[in-house]
Image: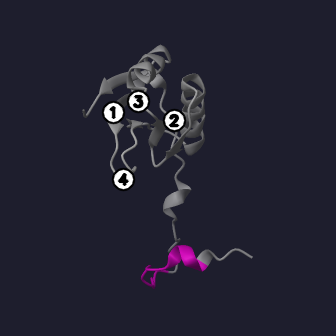
Amino acid sequence: MEKDWKKRLGVVYSTNPEFQFESEQDEVQETLSPHLQKLYVSLDRKNRKGKIVTLIEGFVGTEESLRSLAKELKSKCGVGGSAKDREILIQGDFRDRIMVLLEEKGFKVKRSGG
């Protein structure tokens, strides 16, 4: 039994008999091809107890595609990391290596931050 009503919290009642509730998650985001995407690679240490991570931002696509790209980058760098909310975190300073790997895959890559 799915609790569909939780998705509708905060929705005002409609008297329109033809009203259909539309969930924001109904839209499936497609993954743009690499040559159409511009990714930003930077180093980050905010809220990470002083440890440096390489941050890749700007990915446009499905969560599955994001996780797949993150898995490939983590594997090629030999480190851990995570992927969520259109961002990939790679543990350590691998900014230059990741920029080369992403460019080889066809992405437009730009260094951002420090």
Q: Looking at the magenta stretch, what is its main secondary structure?
A: loop
* Disc 2: CA contacts within 10 A as few (<14), some (14-19) or many (>=20): some
For residue 81, the mark is none
Q: Nearer the viewer, mark 4 or mark 2?
A: 4
Dividing the picture into quadrants, the one containing residue 12 is bottom left
For residue 42, the mark is 1
Which amino acid is tagged 4? Asn
Span of residues in magenta: 5-16
Q: Nearer the viewer, mark 3 or mark 1?
A: 3
For residue 31, the mark is 2
Dividing the picture into quadrants, the one containing residue 109 is top left
**Residue sitting nearer the eye, 56 or 52:** 52
Residue marked by disc 4: 47
**Helix, strand, or loop for circle 4?**
loop
Q: Nearer the viewer, mark 1 or mark 4?
A: 4
State how far apart marks 4 and 3 are (Cα).
16 Å
